[in-house]
Image (cartoon, grey):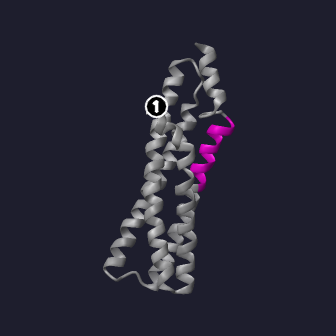
Amino acid sequence: MEFLAGLHPKIVHFPIVLLLCYVVLEIISALSKKEVFSRAAHITLFLGVVAALFAVLTGQQAEELASKWDEAGAIIPFKAIGEHEDFADLTIWYFLTILIIRTFLVLKKKFSDNIKYIFVVLALVGSYFIYQVGEHGSKLVYKYGVGTELKKAETENNN
């Protein structure tokens, strides 16, 4: 599944953008009181959660590949990978929970203007989790070189 591992750096940008767009649309929806923004927020949240599922799947494959590099003699920062993974898991569960509750309230026609402000706060909290996932992920690349040609060369040189 090395193919999926190679997709991880490309796919991760989709949930980041979609979930941050959701946050912005949720704010606009609450302030403008226009239904079109509320629907756009809901659809964007759904797409962001789906994209995050793909990012987690490819991330798990990337971690498996890193384990193989570790066995080949490369120095892999598994603690940093674990921190990145923990924030990614927290983020996806957090936004999935928001999606489920939001969908339930919309279907029951209880997604009122007052409730929208609560979701704005929840969305803003979620944006912090997105930041943390990106912060830990970028540390893996820029500090440790995980997923780069440098790490592949290190593995090949140790064989």
Taking 136 as reference, is 100 above or below it? below
Q: Residue furthest left?
A: 108
What residue do we see at 63% from left, 48% from top?
135
What residue do we see at 53% from left, 62% from top?
18
According to the image, label 1 marks what residue?
A: 64
Q: Is 158 situated left or right of 58 in this image?
A: right
Total marks shown come to 1
Taking 90 as reference, is 114 above or below it? below
In x, y percent, where is residue 138?
A: 64, 44
What residue do we see at 56% from left, 49% from top?
133
Depth check: 102 or 150 in front? Answer: 150
Taking 60 as reference, is 28 above or below it? below
Depth check: 118 or 19 in front? Answer: 19
Taking 115 as reference, is 56 above or below it? above
Question: In the rendered structure, does residue 137 fall within the stretch colored magenta?
Answer: yes
What residue do we see at 36% from left, 66% from top?
100
Question: In the rendered structure, does residue 90 fall within the stretch colored magenta?
Answer: no
Q: Residue furthest top?
A: 159
User: Dot 1 lies on which element?
Assistant: helix
Q: Looking at the figure, which quarter contains the C terminus?
A: top right
Range of magenta residues: 131-143
Three-letter amino acid code at the position of disc 1: Glu
Magenta segment, prevailing SS (helix, strand or loop)? helix
Q: Looking at the figure, which quarter contains the N terminus?
A: top left
In x, y percent, where is residue 43?
A: 44, 70
Q: Residue 28 is drawn in which quadrant?
A: bottom right
